[in-house]
Amino acid sequence: MPRGECRGQGWWHGKFRGCGYRLTLGREAILEVLAKSEKHLSAEDIYMKIHPRHPNIGLTTIYRTLDVLSSLGMIYKLDFGDGRARYEFAEGPKGAHHHHHLVCTGCNRVVDYTDFIDEEVELLQQTEKGLGKKYNFKINNHIIQFYGLCEKCSGKK
Amino acid sequence: MPRGECRGQGWWHGKFRGCGYRLTLGREAILEVLAKSEKHLSAEDIYMKIHPRHPNIGLTTIYRTLDVLSSLGMIYKLDFGDGRARYEFAEGPKGAHHHHHLVCTGCNRVVDYTDFIDEEVELLQQTEKGLGKKYNFKINNHIIQFYGLCEKCSGKK
DNA sequence: TTGTTATTGAAAACCATTTCCATTAATAGA
DNA sequence: TCTATTAATGGAAATGGTTTTCAATAACAA
Ligand SMILES: [Mn+2]
Ligand SMILES: [Mn+2]
Ligand SMILES: [Zn+2]
Ligand SMILES: [Zn+2]
């Protein structure tokens, strides 16, 4: 491992620098957690995961960094109705792992599904195009979520 | 106007009483505001509208009532990312006025659209059926929202 | 009319997120 | 490599939408 320039090698280096942002240890750590984690982490989840290794990175920085990443389109900010924002690494609507969400309103469990995703995405793209033209919007994102009760929650009525 | 039983005549009387809820002045007032208002009111918006006529109905009651109405499926609770929940009268996915949302991330303006709604709803119903079976969910709601910049916000870049 | 108990209002608590501000560190330029 | 600039940071405090608490009130079954 080369001395000094340990950071700045990731594929996101350019993305950051190109937008005038500095590449800091905190930003890298957060991005790394999101990139390799399971999904839907809250700011505090991320803080917890980072803290052991980087005890000097504060929760405030997590929030600020998540805002930056979100505005750069590198992560998605999600709301599943449990009172805190959740984040997941973005793969872009054309990306291989693009998915939508199925949320249990009983236990807050979230299922990432990719079934039907092709049909959905195709229809969404048409809709997006039509809406963009009709309402003069520059659309750059969408959300589809289904809400219901999972088997367990449905049973315990 | 008949004496005494001024309340309890609305079509929602049965819905309430059937679920064991009491029909109170506050609940009626809130439902009325939602039913005849333009859209996407926050709890405080509703409070403001009700207060002149019913200065003794508190914000706490608004929140509590919105929860009840929401759980009964009579209204939808929405999140447009502006830090407060917003509510709209429900017409049900089969209802005549079912619509989805187009949100400007610049100025928070929200457009209700019904374009493409038929194709969307059809696909959603298939998806819903498929997902429900595969993941053993009892799905009873969905959200579709497009995010982007409206003409004005896109221009002032 | 009366008793039961769901509902209410006001104030306080809650808690995720944001703001403040003095300090630190990433980076461009010498 | 050293230095100056200023973006980024962390901790504490503030913010603000929503929830909780609890004694008082009112809906409604009998
Ligand atoms: Mn996901
Ligand atoms: Mn709407
Ligand atoms: Zn569940
Ligand atoms: Zn706008």
Image (cartoon, coloured by chain):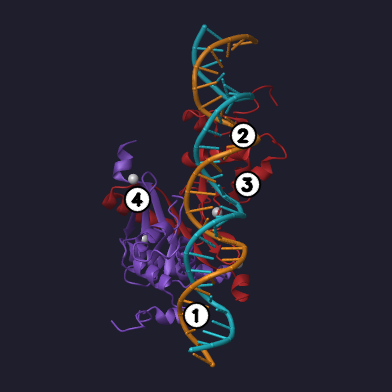
Chain colours: A red, B purple, C cyan, D orange
Q: Is residue C12 above or below residue A2?
A: below
| Inter-mark Cα distance, 4 to 1 | 36 Å
Q: Residue at (59%, 69%) from the top-left corner?
A: A150
- Is label 1 in a helix, a strand or a loop? loop
Pair 4/1: label in front:
1
The picture quadrant for ligand 3 comes to bottom right
Q: Is mark 3 within 8 Å of ligand 1?
A: no
Q: Amino acid at mark 1?
A: Cys
| Inter-mark Cα distance, 4 to 2 | 34 Å
| In front of the other: A35 or B72 | B72
| In front of the other: B20 or B153 | B20
Q: Chain of mark 2?
A: A
Q: Amino acid at mark 3?
A: Glu
User: What residue is disc 4 on?
Assistant: B109
User: What residue is disc 1 on?
Assistant: B19
| Inter-mark Cα distance, 1 to 2 | 51 Å
| Inter-mark Cα distance, 3 to 4 | 30 Å
Query: Can see residue A114?
Result: no
Query: Can see residue B9?
Result: yes
Residue A131 at x, y percent in the picture? 31, 53
- Is label 3 in a helix, a strand or a loop? helix
Asked if disc 3 and disc 4 are in contact, CB closer than 8 Å, the reply is no
Q: Chain of mark 4?
A: B
Pair 1/2: label in front:
1
Q: Could you tell me which quadrant the C terminus of chain A lies in?
A: bottom right
Residue B11 at x, y percent in the picture? 36, 80
Q: Is mark 4 within 8 Å of ligand 4?
A: yes
Q: Amino acid at mark 4?
A: Arg
Hey, which residue is sitting farthest right in the picture?
A52
| Labels 2 and 3 within one chain | yes
Residue B31 at x, y percent in the picture? 38, 70
Which mark is on residue A44?
3
